[in-house]
Image (tube, rainbow, N blue to C red):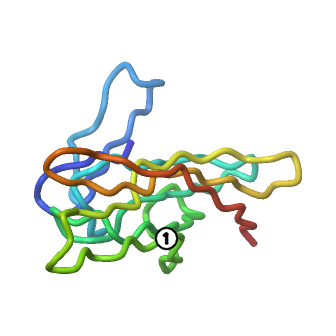
Amino acid sequence: MVLRTRDGFLWKTVSRDRGETWAEPLRTDLVAATTSHSIFRTRSGRLVLVHNESPPPTRTNLNIRISSDEGATWGAPCLLAEAATPGKDEVVWSRQATYPSVAELRDGSLVVVWTDLSVADTEQYGDIRAARVRVE
């Protein structure tokens, strides 16, 4: 399991008994915003991590990483989406590419879905975005 925290990094823990008990969480070196992320195991057994690789409180860079060793190490990040920083004269005070989810298609490609949000004092609105990714 990969945990979100408020310290700017993802933490991980492992269960060896199907979730009955969990090891002590350990901090990873993966920079992460204070937002949800998605970890997914492909049919080939690799782990796919999609998260905001940006320091809190921003949620601008949405990246995907692959691990072939149960999350001990992660491949280089691949940028899926980047939310533009609002201009100083805009009413919007935050733009976010966040809240990802992953699914695997029959052909082995992945579909990643996320929200592209704009946040202002009086409203929050956005769009649902998606990308189809082939993991080699």
Mark 1, other Cα within 10 Å: few <14 / some 14–19 / many ≥20: many
Looking at the image, which residue is at 12% across and 53% down?
6
Say whether residue 5 is left or right of residue 126: left
* 20 over 64 or under it: above or below: above
Looking at the image, which residue is at 75% across and 67% down?
134
Say whether residue 85 is left or right of residue 77: left
Closer to the camera in the image, 27 or 51: 51
For the C terminus, the image quarter is bottom right
* 24 over 110 or under it: above or below: above
Helix, strand or loop at disc 1?
Answer: strand
Residue 37, image x, y percentages: 40, 50
Closer to the camera in the image, 96 or 29: 96
Looking at the image, which residue is at 41% across and 48% down?
99
The picture quadrant where one finds residue 60 is bottom left
* 47 over 63 or under it: above or below: above
The type of residue carrying mark 1 is: Ala
Residue 33, image x, y percentages: 24, 60
For the N terminus, the image quarter is top left
Please give the count of numbered marks on the rendered protein: 1
Say which residue label 1 marks: 81
Residue 27, image x, y percentages: 21, 58
Closer to the camera in the image, 120 or 66: 120
Looking at the image, which residue is at 75% across and 53% down?
44
Residue 86, image x, y percentages: 25, 74
